[in-house]
Amino acid sequence: MHPPPPGAAMDFSQNSLFGYMEDLQELTIIERPVRRSLKTPEEIERLTVDEDLSDIERAVYLLSAGQDIQGTSVIANLPCLMRQNPAETLRRVLPKVREVLHVAGVEMQLTAAASFLTVLQEESVSIHTYAHSFLQVILLHLEHRDTGVSNAWLETLLSVIEVLPKETLRHEILNPLVSKAQLSQTVQSRLVSCKILGKLTNKFDAHTIKREILPLVKSLCQDVEYEVRSCMCRQLENIAQGIGTELTKSVVLPELIELSRDEGSSVRLAAFETLVNLLDIFDTDDRSQTILPLVKSFCEKSFKADESILISLSFHLGKLCHGLYGIFTPDQHLRFLEFYKKLCTLGLQQENGHNENQIPTQILEQEKKYISVRKNCAYNFPAMIVFVDPKNFHMELYSTFFCLCHDPEVPVRYTIAICFYEVLDALIDHLPEILELMSTGGESSVQENKLLSLPDLIPALTAAEQRAAASLKWRTHEKLLQKYACLPHVISSDQIYYRFLQRMFTIMMTNNVLPVQKAASRTLCIFLRYNRKQEQRHEVIQKLIEQLGQGKSYWNRLRFLDTCECIIEIFSKSFFCKYFFLPVIELTHDPVANVRMKLCCLLPKVKSTLKIPADKHLLQQLEMCVRKLLCQEKDKDVLAIVKRTVLELDRMEMSMDAFQKKFYEKDLLDQEKEREELLLLEMEQLEKEKQQNDGRPMSDKTFEKKRRDTKTPAALPKSLPVAVAGPSSGTSSTSKEIKKSKLIRSQSFNNQAFHAKYGNLDKCTSKSSAAAYTPSVSAKTSVISLTDNSFRTRNANSVPASFSPNTPLPSTSRGTGNSADAKSSGKDAQPRKATLKSRKSNP
């Protein structure tokens, strides 16, 4: 239709009217197909089903009188009907399905095969009932004229064979197979027989296989059709695994040798691949005298054959060289290596000046096959390094590696990158191993100065993280952050502190993806765990409490609880109790229900960090918080979780200061963690002394040796000192441990806001006399001195602006034996104090 030009006057003459009518007729012609696609009232009436019918009645009606699309829908819904009413479905619906399938089209047949398989997998009925009701339908349609339908029913049958009893397999499948595998049957029937024989081998004993199955196998291996010979050859691997080594050598190997010389290229290829997959079964004599000559002949003829053979050969070459390793002569070894190198450059030597659009189709297909060959060579490159010995890599394979890395095709370069983890996605899974090798130069010893020879590594790591963060692949970002947990073993503590810690904080507080935030949180905890400087550790702890635990955003407070969960897992119990116990239970006052709900779920883990009697005062604080939640919580969801948590807390058994048999392994692990935490303090002191003496920092080698020397032995001696502050013992070793423990626990930090809030907890105690939760331990709450005598503001030039050490930290001390020390240590420095008054708590 051609509208008049703009501004033109409407012409109502006869010629113009005829022109408009022609245009209208064009519109009518265009509209006719739309009208024809609509259903007539009669058609709609035939498609309408009474809504009052049950599911079974509706299925029967649609299979009997409905259209094909409705019958297909019923068959697709067959697994659901079997789950709801198996007896009625088998009695009324399945017979109708059998009738419909006799004349069904391809789509309905494929749907039925899938539905029958789903019914089997869901175990809606017993195997006996399934075999009685479904097996004959499956066998009936195995030889459908459509190949796709036949393969679909065959896949269903192969799955059924896995679960059928032997007697059913013998009578229903194996006995009829004898006639189905004869030359008088169709090619399709014989192909199906090959695949069924491969599956049946694992279901019968060796005598039955030798007497009834192997004759059929030999017959099909010598079939007149190359398709049947190739199909049977590919099943010989399954058959060999079912009959054992002796029968494989006497029956299967001769057949494979004969098939490897077959006139059909697909048969020879199947024989070659089967031989490679069965290399582990044959002994050294069979490999050297029989298989190796066949493989050599196959490789020599491969360049003259179809490129598809080269694709398969290049894919299996690594496995082949590994399986025949040790029986090659030096000349054979060199020949196979040269053959591999030739495959790596296949198609690259041909130069042409044609545009891709001008190249004939067959040449394009050939080049695609060459690309596949080079890609397979890249895939097998690690196996070839083992084949030539890593010591000979530079001389034998470096030039080939260079060619593969600079291949003009992306799939080839990507595959070689995956093998050697040179791109971001492929690198991440093996990042710890690679960084360790880079930091040690491939040697087992630790270098005196980490990464002096790799100054660009840290910028590369930060750039990789920023690249992952800027992409839309959050899973890659999450995995990268998880792998960065290996950095304490690769770079120095100061490098992590100044280059990575602040980045972890930023991700935790600004990233919108929860798994990424949790990965950053856990990695930050590991960085904190292996930090070598106490002052830096205090700054990180302070930042966690202030910006996350006391942050304005409830989202940050939730992340604080996630971080505390990681700290409980990674650090010792005493570390958590000292720095994080009070900030965590302070969140029972949080105004956001989601935060209180998450806290309640964490409380059992929090309680597991306490030891009796040293932590009775902390246990009382925990119990008061729980009682307050029980008596004041208004949110019904939170209250429900609180009640469940109370029951779980009551069932928990408390760990004691002394080792208990039931908690032996956990206590031993916790003491090992505490020993390492004390070791960090000792190493820091030794490092300061060494810097004062000769100006050089302590090497990581010395640190590792010291850490190994102080590890907890497997068998615990009777007088083993426990590294917690408690009543003094008579032994000198115990007093040393107590001094070390006091050293770290006396460095406490003030938290006046927490003390102010907990002043109101006494009110809840008087209100909750009828509450369901009662204290399990009656104890007197000691005066806890929250002081810091060691935390000092560092030089402004050496502290990032984001880490301000001026604000004090909260901490708790275990037991009552530390209070005097804490007070005396605070007299000189006169730090700020926050005390929790002593109070009796009666059950």
Image (cartoon, rainbow, N blue to C red):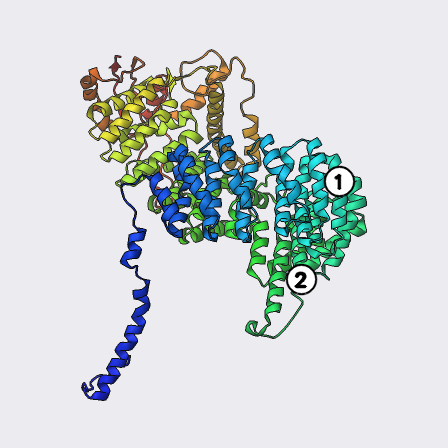
Q: Is residue 589 above or below residue 395?
A: above
Is 117 left, or right, of 269 in this rendering? left
- Answer whether residue 540 is visible to the viewer in this image: yes
> Which disc, if any, is residue 251?
1
Q: Secondary structure at mark 1?
A: helix
Residue 576 % position (x, y) = 38, 28
Q: Are the residues tagged 2 and 1 within 8 Å (C-beta)?
A: no
Q: Earlier in the sequence, mark 2 or mark 1?
A: 1
Amino acid of disc 2: Leu
Residue drawn at x 64%, y 58% is: 373
Amino acid of disc 1: Val
Query: Quarter-wise, where is residue 805 in the image?
Result: top left
> Which image quadrant: the C terminus?
top left
**Badge 1: how crowded within 10 Å, few (<14), some, or many (20+)?**
some
Residue 224 % position (x, y) = 71, 53
- Answer whether residue 695 is visible to the viewer in this image: no
> Which disc, if any, is residue 346?
2
Residue drawn at x 56%, y 55% is: 414
**Spatial separation of the CA atoms under disc 2 and disc 1:** 38 Å
> Which image quadrant: the N terminus?
bottom left
